[in-house]
Image (cartoon, grey):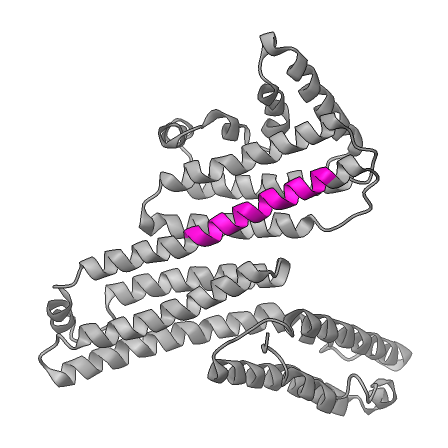
Amino acid sequence: MISHGYIRRMVQAFEDASFAQAFGSPVHALENWFSELDVDWVLQIHDEQGFRRLLRDKSAMTQELVKKWIRALIVIVASITESVFPFPTTAADARFVKASITEMLDVVDVIITALEAEKKLQVVLDMFTGVCGASHILTPVDISSSEGQSIFNVIGNMLERQANRLSEMIASTMEEVRTLVEEDDDSWAMEISRGGGEIHNITQFIMNCIVSMMNAHTSTQNTAPSHHTENLGGLINGTINYLKGLLFTKSESCSDQSLRYLFLLNNTYFVAHVVSESSDSYLDVSWGHVLSCIPKSRFPGPIHCWINTSSLAKFESSFHKTYQTQKLWKVPDPQLRDELRTVITQRVVSGYHSYLEEHPELEKHVGRESSSPEVLQEMLGELFEG
């Protein structure tokens, strides 16, 4: 991260500009700081038209700018956490920190209002993930002054408000998506007949939205779990249920009942398949690293025993860390909850059990009270209750 000395120079430049109004506003002093982070454009746009001009003049894509914005926000918060809070903090520090975060967060609404519903969701999700990540970085540290504690609280509140705002935007964007879908009410019967009951383009569109939300949900679960993650999970489940209901209702407009039910089969199978693939992605991201602690290669002699013992310790540590993190996550649907528990058990505990059978010399290293396959299986049966 950026050094304490660098931050001190930025604070001083900002403070000097505050007393030299004839030479520019304090915000002008942020240009070097933001320029090095490749987000100096944040200081140049104040409305929707300004953002559109920026896209035209820079020949940049919105997604590209948002990625730079997320990276810069993370660096700013992390640098402040490492280079300001652990040291004696002044009023000048407070002004600099607040101005930096304010400028970064104020641009969010400008960007989002310039986008149409079809393009808005991914941008909002990306920003939501970035803000949640930045907020998670802002963990309590040893703060050496009341001024530092005050800044810490201000930043935390600013990030929390923005996370709330973005969470609301995700929900309202999905409402816009529903409105767009339902406006196309009269074409369903004709399209079902013309397509021979195949997967409807609206099914694909909504599932693309759901997959985007699932990816954001997985990302925040792994890096910055919070009540916002739970809310997003609820929105995902609600949208899946909405789509299933929509398909059933729209299929009723089809006069050929055989074609109607073929349409339902094709579309509901597609929904289930995409959700199932997301379940596989969840397993890979959340539990794949646990099994990866167990080596597949065999080594001869003493090194063989040492590697296996070391790997066993890593596996146990990784398992318990992942379990403790995810134990309080919630899956409201009992069938999905049971299915997830089953597939996690099959992948993790079965792999662990096979490894122990291949290496009986490790039996004495397995703690019966905390890490036997039976104990781990029982623990996994308690996941996702919230």
Q: Where does the magenta region start and end?
A: 150-169
From the viewer's side, name the closer residue of 100 and 292: 100
Q: Residue at x 64, y 83 (%)?
A: 382
Q: Residue at x 68, y 84 (%)?
A: 379
Q: Horizontally, is 361 left or right of 9 in the view? A: right
Q: Horizontally, is 47 left or right of 372 in the view? A: left
Residue 296: x and y in percent read: 71, 78
Residue 174: x and y in percent read: 36, 57
318 within the magenta span: no
166 within the magenta span: yes
Q: Quadrant of residue 309?
A: bottom right
Residue 61 in sight here: no
Q: Quadrant of residue 26?
A: top right
Residue 11 in sight here: yes
3 lies above or below 197? above
69 lies above or below 324? above
